Image (tube, rainbow, N blue to C red):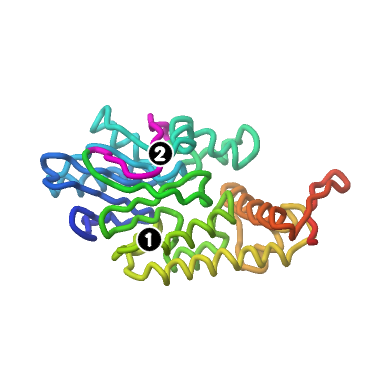
């Protein structure tokens, strides 16, 4: 069972395929701890609860950085043990966490077939309440919530002292290599959010949503921006074509093989985001040709 790894005073990492953070202010046995992201499912949440119990820690609140199923899928399990535990999330993301069918709906563009309603795209509903970016006290813990949209419509990075949990604004190098088409809804905003994290001063440790903690914030940002840029270049080089035309060409170039409907709709969103970025910058235009939506380079 993974242990809680200390990152700094009052900050602990529960490492997994999707990282969770545990934050405490002062005496955690008295005030309880803030859990940041609860993982994909019941298995992650049960392991996290056992790790907390081993340290005699009790959760006082949950913060979900965004509404993707792998970051809030454990909420329901934790609520079974701690009924009434407050859950916070960015406003739009809180609505999706409370009504999680919205995630496969926006990915598919209609009511999703059964193949798109598995745990990777459809987590159990939980009563998240909206919270604005900025300094906040969540479960007796003082944190700073930093707006980092792009990967999701709204998303927060979390600063606690000298520790920064970047959520999915940044990915570890292994994750970038394994998933060349880094998921996003707004690729331009994703790049700006990653770049903006460099302005933070006094960050000693940064934790990506997927990957290992590091002290090299600048290096991690550079690796992510390079990966995001490669996708934009591949999309630009695959014009003209429909979204599906471009997706097939980009997958061939980046050596991505899609084998499930879930992978297809996720990667289709990535390509759509980069096409929208190119259209927004004047590098591409949209046309309807032979009943197809076609993007052409300018």
Which mark sits nearer the N-terminus, 2 or 1? 2
Q: Residue at x 87, y 48 (%)?
A: 289
- Whole-Å distance between the Cαs marked 2 and 1? 19 Å
Q: Is residue 116 left or right of residue 59?
A: right
Up/down of 187 relative to 110, above or below: below
Callout 2: helix, strand or loop? Answer: loop
Dividing the picture into quadrants, the one containing residue 267 is bottom right
Up/down of 149 relative to 175, above or below: above
Dividing the picture into quadrants, the one containing residue 247 is bottom right
Q: Residue at x 16, y 44 (%)?
A: 57
Q: Judge the density around disc 2: few (<14), some (14-19), many (≥20) Cα neighbours within 10 Å.
A: some
Q: Which mark is residue 255?
A: none
- Residue 157 image offset from top left, x and y in percent: 39, 51
Q: Is residue 290 left or right of residue 156?
A: right
- For label 1, the residue is 200
Label tally: 2
Q: Is residue 251 left or right of residue 245?
A: left
Q: Residue at x 34, y 64 (%)?
A: 212
Extreme-top residue of the structure:
84
Q: Answer whether residue 129 is magenta in the image.
A: yes
- Residue 252 image offset from top left, x and y in percent: 67, 66
Q: Answer whether residue 184 is magenta in the image.
A: no
The residue segment tinted magenta is: 124-139
274 or 271: nearer the viewer: 274
Locate the N terminus by quadrant: bottom left
**Mark 2 vs 1: CB contact within 8 A:** no
Q: Residue at x 29, y 51 (%)?
A: 21
- Residue 12 image offset from top left, x and y in percent: 23, 55
- For label 2, the residue is 132
Locate the C terminus by quadrant: bottom right
Extreme-right residue of the structure:
290
């Amino acid at each position: 069972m993974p242990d809680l790894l200390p990152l700094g005073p009052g900050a602990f990492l529960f490492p997994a395929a999707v990282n969770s953070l545990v934050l405490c202010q002062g005496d955690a046995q008295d005030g309880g701890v803030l859990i940041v992201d609860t993982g994909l499912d019941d298995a992650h949440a049960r392991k996290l609860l056992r790790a907390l119990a081993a340290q005699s820690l009790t959760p006082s609140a949950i913060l979900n950085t965004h509404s993707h199923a792998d970051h809030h899928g454990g909420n329901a399990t934790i609520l079974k043990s701690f009924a009434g535990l407050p859950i916070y999330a960015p406003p739009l993301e809180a609505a999706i966490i409370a009504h999680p069918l919205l995630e496969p709906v926006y990915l598919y563009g209609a009511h999703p077939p059964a193949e798109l309603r598995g745990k990777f795209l459809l987590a159990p509903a939980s009563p998240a309440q909206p919270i604005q970016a900025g300094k906040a006290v969540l479960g007796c813990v003082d944190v700073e919530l930093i707006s980092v949209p792009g990967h999701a419509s709204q998303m927060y990075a979390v600063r606690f002292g000298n520790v920064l949990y970047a959520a999915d604004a940044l990915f570890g190098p292994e994750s970038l290599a394994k998933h060349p088409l880094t998921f996003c809804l707004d690729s331009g905003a994703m790049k700006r959010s990653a770049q903006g994290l460099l302005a933070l001063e006094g960050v000693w440790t940064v934790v990506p949503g997927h990957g290992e903690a590091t002290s090299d914030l600048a290096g991690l940002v550079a690796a992510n921006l390079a990966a995001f840029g490669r996708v934009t270049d591949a999309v630009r080089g695959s014009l003209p074509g429909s979204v599906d035309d471009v997706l097939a060409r980009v997958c061939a170039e980046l050596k991505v093989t899609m084998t499930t409907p879930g992978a297809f709709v996720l990667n289709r969103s990535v390509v759509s985001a980069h096409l929208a970025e190119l259209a927004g910058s004047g590098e591409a235009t949209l046309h309807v040709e032979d009943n197809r939506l076609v993007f052409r380079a300018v």
